Amino acid sequence: MIDQQELEILKGALDRLSEGFIDLPPADSHLDSKRIREVMDDVAVRMQDNYPYHHPRYAGQMLKPPHPVARIAYMLALWINPNNHALDGGRASSAMEKEAVAAIGAMLGFDEPLGHLCGGGTMANLEALWIAGKLHPGKKIVASVQAHYTHSRISEVLSLGFDAVATDDFGRMDPAALEDILAEGEVGTVVVTLGTTGVGAIDPLDDILRLRQKYEFRIHVDAAYGGYFQIASRLNSKSRKAFDEIGNADSIVIDPHKHGLQPYGCGCVLFRDPAVGVLYQHESPYTYFSSGDLHLGEISLECSRPGAAAVALWATQQLLPMVHGGEFSEMLDKSLLAARALYEKMAASKKFRTLLPPELDIVVYAVDSADAKTASSRARAVFNKAATKNLHLALIELPMALVKTYWPELESNQESVTCLRSCLMKPEHLDWVDDIYDVLETVC
């Protein structure tokens, strides 16, 4: 887990950081190193009670270790502990945040967007839908039934109406079903998900944009999970069409703490039209006095925010530019290839049933059985047995109608089926597909 080189790099960076403050008079820290060592030993023991999120044998939830440069930069920034709400609380880190967000905007096709980092996708989506509600007061928010539950919950928090749109056999929003809702004239914003967190489905943004020409509504793209695949080279043609149109959305959310190799929490919200910043305006008589430049707190619902997150993201972008065909892009492609490789192996297995073909790096499969209840029970058994072999998976409940599309002979003796789900979001997973499959065959 621990590479001593990381600690050496951090020590060198800290020495360099200290050079900027040599003119200050000394201030004793009174460090009780003995007691701190005792406490940290206890912390280390307690932290052993975790799944091995960093290891390729962890193929369950959306948990990915930060890149070493992000980890080192974050720790370095903690010696300053900047707050990116106002410029006097985070001078260098605020500048880094602006640069990092602009780079993400450029990757997604936004020229000079308004945006900032936040605690994660939920907060980022809250801000996007809050702006949407101000621009279309009283209008509904709609998202697919496979979209993240946060959209319906946020709509409730904002006192906005919400409707769920049916999906097709691939878990994507159905444009025909969407048009039926749009025809009622009550929709203000359509949430288009590019990478659902359940099955990794890509909503047809290109088709939905054509509907915007007929009906008046905002398009908010929730790319919290899938956004970085914009620079991947191995997307299928249908997904590529959707990603190619992402710059035509009104707002976008992306989570650097997922595929962006960042520590939690680091989300990002961007608006194509910077003029929406006027909707954030508020008075703070003691906060924004240190500079006439834009303070990030002036365009954010959150107040205090960790400048360390911005420093880590900026450092990562310097090391791994977000460009097609670069090292970072190749990492994403490896995750796509890993998912397809596992899917193909599971499709050839006599013990499992593959369901939706993976569009991103999420593979969903069921345990072969005669009926839905037995399939669900066997999936939970495989989940538990695999864990004893240090292979950690996830479970997902899928509606019977969707499962029957791929498994028509399955007896429907309950409304949903518990299935297994693997997020192969580490590039190393490509080299571990055979190992993962062998364990699955052994425990089933």
Image (tube, rainbow, N blue to C red):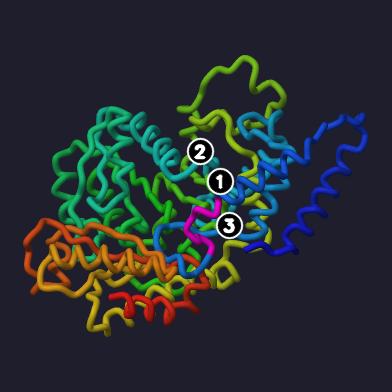
Give the x, y percent position of residue 283.
Answer: 55, 17
Q: Secondary structure at mark 2?
A: helix
Residue 65 visible, this angle: yes
From which residue to which does the magenta span run?
47-54
Q: Quadrant of the N terminus?
A: bottom right
Amino acid type of the residue that numbered disc 1 sits on in the rendered structure: Glu
* Residue located at (74% from left, 63% from top): 4
Residue 129: image location, x then y, percent: 36, 37
Q: Position of residue 265 (x, y in %)?
A: 53, 45
**Circles 2 and 3: CB atoms closer than 8 Å:** no
Q: Residues within 10 Å of mark 2 (few under 14, many from 20)?
A: some
CA gap between label 2 and label 3 equals: 30 Å
Q: Is residue 397 magenta?
A: no
State the mark number for residue 66. Answer: 3
Which residue matches tag 1? 112
* CB contact under 8 Å: marks 2 and 1: yes
Q: Quadrant of residue 26?
A: top right
Is 256 or 279 nearer to us in this picture? 256
Q: Is residue 372 left or right of residue 427?
A: left
Q: Is residue 401 above or below residue 18?
A: below
Mark carried by residue 274 = 2
Camera-nearest label, 3 or 1? 3
Q: CA distance from mark 3 to mark 1?
A: 27 Å
Amino acid at the residue labelled 3 = Pro
Callout 1 crowding tier (Cα within 10 Å): few <14, some 14–19, many ≥20: some
Closer to the chain start, of discs 2 and 1, is: 1
Residue 99 left/right relative to 225? right
Measured along the vertical axis of the image, is residue 15 above or below residue 401?
A: above
